[in-house]
Amino acid sequence: MAMNAQGRQTRADAFAATDAPTFTGNKALQIEEDLIFEIGDFAGTGVDLPEPAAKESRLGDMERTSAIGLPGLSEPETMRHYVRLSQKNYAIDMGPFPLGSCTMKHNPRLNEKIARLPGFADLHPLTPEAQCQGALEVIYALETWLKELTGMPAVAMSPKAGAHGELCGMMSIRAALEARGEAATRTRVLAPESAHGTNPATAVQCGFTVDEIPADKTGRVDLAALKDMLGPDVAGIMVTNPNTCGLFERDIRAIADAVHEAGGYFYCDGANFNAIAGKVKPGDLGVDAMHINLHKTFSTPHGGGGPGSGPTVLSEALAPFAPVPYVVLEDGAYALVETRRAAKEEGESAKSLGRLTAFHGQMGMFTRALAYMMSHGLDGIAQAAEDAVLNANYVLARLKSEMTPAFDGYCMHEALFNDRFLKDTGVETIDFAKAMIDEGYHPMTMYFPLVVHGAMLIEPTESESKRELDQFCDALLSLARRAKAGEADVFKAAPVHAPRRRLDETAAARKPVLRWTPPVAEAAE
Ligand SMILES: *Cc1c(COP(=O)(O)O)cnc(C)c1O
């Protein structure tokens, strides 16, 4: 495959990749886009400023001696470049985003409107408390909602992603063990085989070793096996519920009791809270710490590296170790407890583990999440969870005739399939996913969880209507039939309608080329 210096497929190659090559390389109104440096020259500029009158430079030897190397484009050229780039993103606003374990749901425009109110959006994080009472009230109100929804007594608001919330929870557990004088002996953390990669990574980051809890044949934690693994060296467990196979851990109370009896703590990965929000309170299940991905459950946009927010709720046992800062309400005014010392004076959080981030958390995500909660109400949040589970089961039931579910029975918010239906067709999960792109669908999550062979994990969320779900299911059923009918060639070639075909995703991830370098000839100028 011909590549340019940036490792991108060149336009000539894009020609060859299509059956109907065009002079420009564009496909109808899908327009090819070069890097901004490749479009313009370095001489032109979008703004014409009058030549300044000759003046002696005051920069001395700091004056620039070489060209600055900014691309020179006219204003419309610049505008078009960025608008075209923006259109290359697939988004939940364009079509279904069936990624499992990600909860890609509709983000109501109301949230955006509220988050953009200048009183929230333009606040500097160092604004004096007296001048940002409204913003502090938003944080305080969101804390209250999160504690109410989870039935937990405390919440740390500053973590900026799910994984960061895990770090917060596991650091709290370690701090609690240190306070008990058991940090040196309790060094093992147990996590199911199906766990999201961030779980073991977090535990290791906090200095623990990780052992895998085997799954039973229904795809859930094997309770007997877990009990055998517990002992005086166990710091705690990390369990996702509903789990990454889209199944509710029915033994969750027994799991929590066994872990507590053995002197450990129960970290629950709350990334799948969308399935149970308003229906079950994790506090009632014996959870000690759980992060909530505001950017999944509470509708704020995520993906593409955008901002996340992972507030972490803590049980009575872990609450004293919660990080600063946090908001308190005193005599009708909101205040931030910002330092460990202040927390000590406060008498509340003498053992706080300190600060996790520079400031108070992701304010924009907070405002969006609170707008979502207040516009839905508790009953609306419960309804969303019910609809999400109903939609996933509808997909499961419809696809069952041609595709093979990984486990028997109903699912929660996501439907998990294995690749058994593709056996002997010559088509693999990756080919199936690429063919979905030609049908205009973003693929589902592939090859995760690892416990299921050739896994395909579909999470429609409550956002999709029956009409959307039916079209999606019809497309997948048609693909499954074509795979079985011996059309492997079509799958191996897919995607044929996308601007790029199959890319070396591993190389892109491992050796990303993030910096444009001028072609050699021009650099010499
Ligand atoms: C998304 C997810 C995480 C991590 O959350 P981020 O916000 O991406 O850091 C952890 N566990 C599970 C099960 C998830 O789906």
Image (cartoon, helix red, strand yellow):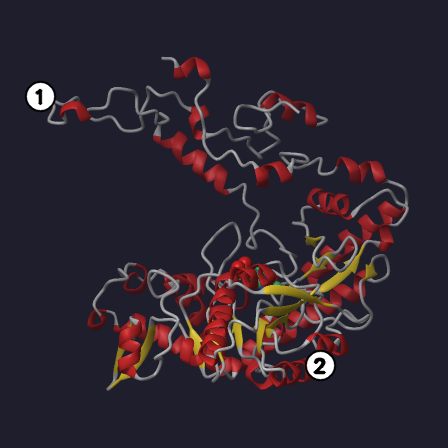
Task: Identify the residue at image location x=59%, y=37%.
Answer: 508
Amino acid type, callout 2 = Asp
Pick the front one: 511 or 406: 511
Q: Is residue 219 left or right of residue 157?
A: right
Q: Are marks 1 and 2 in contact (CB under 8 Å)?
A: no
Quarter of image, res 275: bottom right
Q: Quadrant of the C terminus?
A: top left
Mark carried by residue 398: none
Q: In front: mark 1 or mark 2?
A: 2
Q: Which residue is mark 2?
A: 251
Secondary structure under tag 1 reads loop
Q: Earlier in the sequence, mark 1 or mark 2?
A: 1
Pick the front one: 302 or 229: 229
Q: Which residue is mark 1?
A: 56
Q: Residues within 10 Å of mark 1 (few under 14, many from 20)?
A: few
Q: Is mark 1 within 8 Å of ligand 1?
A: no
